[in-house]
Image: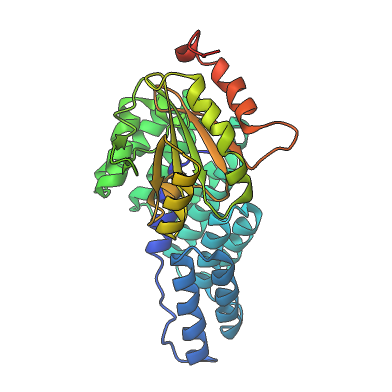
Amino acid sequence: MKKLGFACSIVVLSACLPASLIGQAGPGGAAFKEQFEQGQQALKAGKYKDAIESLKKANAWQGNACGECYLLVAVAYYKSGKLNESVENCDLAAAVASDDKMRATAHSLKGNALFAAAGKDSKKMSAPEVEFRSAIQLNPKSPLFHLSLAKTLLWESKDKDDEAKQELQACLDLNADEKMASEARLLLADPRRGREDFAPEFEISTLQGQQVSLKQLAGRIVVMDFWATWCPPCRASVPELKELTKKYPVEKLMLISVSADKDDGAWREFVAKKKMDWAQYRDADHKVLNAFAIHSFPTYLVIDGDGIIKERFTGMNPQESIVHRLKATLRQMPQLEGEARK
């Protein structure tokens, strides 16, 4: 999915959904509460299939009229990359919503899913634009909705920059939290950030004890390898990744491997055994994985010296190695011109 900044919007929206039906008297009250809470916990733990199953059961106990259930199912589908299903559940949530605030949240979630589904096609941005405008009409005091609309307008066309700036200012005027306010200020200062896929800021401490941040790597090409020891294609790619580290000088290109492993010992053992001597980091709390909206492994990102994600490769292609695909992208980058080692 494109435009990773919207992953933050999904997290914010899912965190503030009211569980107003919990404990409510009515058909299946106790059973509903149990399934709803199980669904919430599974969603929080990233177990999206389990979350969807529990929330659908909870919804059934409410005669399939639980707006919160549909909204959280929409979040689970979005996070698992099933955008059509997310859109469908947003529509169902809007249809049974008990108030305008809930309907507004449904429109905003749908806007996020449609935005992600549009890819890099600016011509498809009119659909999410409509949803974010509907959300604002129903709940004009949400800074998040104004920020989402602004980001859509910026991506849609340079001609909409002035309107986008008005929405960004509205976001700030509504006392957005520091994270949203920081993003709004960045976009106001440089609207181009709304049309490019800028990588989210991160700071990590590698296995080798090195402190690494995106800000620190400005000017360098960064290749990010999202992997896990339990992923066969990830393990198979190690020799080619080693080759990549030898092809370009580290002052021009840095490879960072971010592991999703839960078992610290297994991760350390594998890295040592395979002599993976480049930057290694185990994302125990999935903070980096979530920031980059990583849903499958392996995933490789190529980030240019300005911090813009130029390419995203997912999975392994038996007809074309990952290094071959990366080489084709890296050859097009002026910063690496003439830097490849023989």
Residue at the image position 52 percent from the left and 81 percent from the top: 35
Image coords of residue 8 (percent x, y): 41, 49
Instruction: Name the quadrant containing residue 251.
Output: top left
Image coords of residue 178 (percent x, y): 25, 46
- For the question of whether residue 212 can be seen, the reply is yes
Give the answer, above or below, for where 218 lies relative to 95.
above
Give the answer, above or below, for where 264 lies relative to 339.
below
Q: Give the position of the N terminus as an image quadrant.
A: top right
Residue at the image position 59 percent from the left and 22 percent from the top: 327
Query: Is 88 positioned to the left or the right of 294 in the image?
Result: right
Query: Is 240 positioned to the left or the right of 160 in the image?
Result: right
Residue at the image position 45 percent from the left and 91 percent from the top: 25
- For the question of whether residue 312 can be seen, the reply is no
Counting labels gives 0
Image coords of residue 278 (percent x, y): 42, 34
Residue at the image position 50 percent from the left and 39 percent from the top: 225
Instruction: Name the quadrant containing residue 41.
Output: bottom left
Front residue (pair 265, 290): 265
Image coords of residue 217 (percent x, y): 34, 27
Q: Give the position of the C terminus as an image quadrant.
A: top right
Residue that protrudes farthest toward the right in the picture: 319
Give the answer, above or below, for where 255 lies relative to 4.
above
Front residue (pair 214, 74): 214
Front residue (pair 239, 79): 239
Coloring basis for residues: rainbow
Give the answer, above or below, for where 206 lies relative to 335.
below
